Amino acid sequence: MAVIRPFRALRPEPDRASEVASVPYDVVNTEEARALAANNPLSFLHVSRPEIDMPPGTDPHGDQVYRRALQNYEKLKQECPLVSEESPSLYLYRLIMGDHEQIGVVACCSIDEYDQNIIRKHERTRRDKEDDRTRHMTILRAQTGPVFLTYRGSRNIDTMVMEVTVTNALFDFVAADGVQHTVWHVPDAVRFVHEFREIPFLYIADGHHRAASAARARAELREQSFGHTGDEEYNFFLAVIFPDDQMQILPYNRAVKDFNGLSSDEFLKAIRQSFVIEENGADTPKERGEWCMYLAGRWYSLRLRPDASAPQGVVESLDVSILQDRVLDPVLGIKDVRTDKRIDFVGGVRGPQELRRLVDEGNAAVAFSLYPTTIADLLLVSDAGEIMPPKSTWFEPKLRDGLLIHTI
């Protein structure tokens, strides 16, 4: 049973929503965030990445940065201003990017269900990233960006969603990247709460660190509270929940800086032990089980040799796993993609042209264009209680921070 809970959102007025809304804190670095927030004092990046308002070189995890986050948050609440809903509510959040459209339910989800694996995961989290967002949440006493969840779609919920989308929207704007963001207030939250009780599991698509940080923040705040009941707001985390058949996963490609001491000919000879290589191939795989590789100004198409041992297991059979297990690790010497500085990741809409640029400009020796992991893969891995390789999925379009804030 999936528990969803209405909440009293803290939000901008509709005419300020587009100015406040910002990209997620973790998809930009400090300089990118500083550029995006330039000349926009209402951008939520001043709260989610407050080091942009401090001297260059400031440690983004220093005490003064979290104090600045709180100062900027309080200033935004007063000067924007941010307003609080009079009563707990649910919302719908629609994203339109080109021809793709998806609509999710904005609600708070149970940290107990997260702990019990009713909300399922497919990714390991890093302690340092958890430390950062846990501290951010506890200092602000707020969750300012949602976790991206999915579920196996329900016709009843789809029908209820369509009924709400014919009403007037609360927010509706097109961001600088061309993505349209529309938010509706749900007039009858009880119907959605009851219908979600028929959903056996929710799945984290994107935002594992936000969810893990919410669980850690709950533990800290519970220690500080008197008469803990389990109903406090810190027992729940902010999420947008999309049906699986509306999700869009784009490729998460790889670029490697060198051949691990091999010449390009030696590298090609080594991978021919596992792959059939076709020269002058396409730059984008047409199906699962195909990889496109760019080196020395040429694209190659790769497929596993018919006599190669078939991968076993739901994780091992993923294209990202096969590339790791048969090329990146044994040939290029990249054991851990999370820590090895010789590999870069190119996700989302940047596409194969960015891979070509990296190689042509000498910033990489070889690059790999992958077929995207599917949402079915994600559900299978999560249900099996297993973990995907790092950088397996890139979800697009992205939700915006600062539109609907959950105070804890």
Image (cartoon, rainbow, N blue to C red):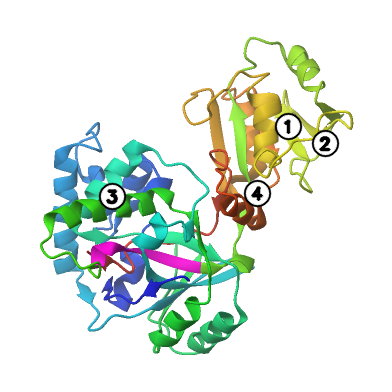
Mark 3 or 1: the one toward you: 3
Q: Amino acid at mark 1?
A: Met
Numbered disc 3: secondary structure: helix
Q: Earlier in the sequence, mark 2 or mark 1?
A: 2
Residue 93 in percent (x, y) is at: 45, 73
Q: Are marks 4 and 3 in contact (CB under 8 Å)?
A: no
CA separation in Å, label 2 and label 4: 21 Å
Q: Earlier in the sequence, mark 4 or mark 1?
A: 1
- 117 within the magenta span: no
Q: Name the residue rendered at 32%, 36% in the picture.
A: 128
154 and 245: which is toward the camera: 154
Q: Amino acid at mark 2?
A: Gly
**Residue occupied by mark 3:** 216
**Residue occupied by mark 4:** 373
Q: Give the quarter of the image for residue 359.
A: top right
**Residue occupied by mark 1:** 293
Which contiguous range is marked in magenta?
Answer: 233-241
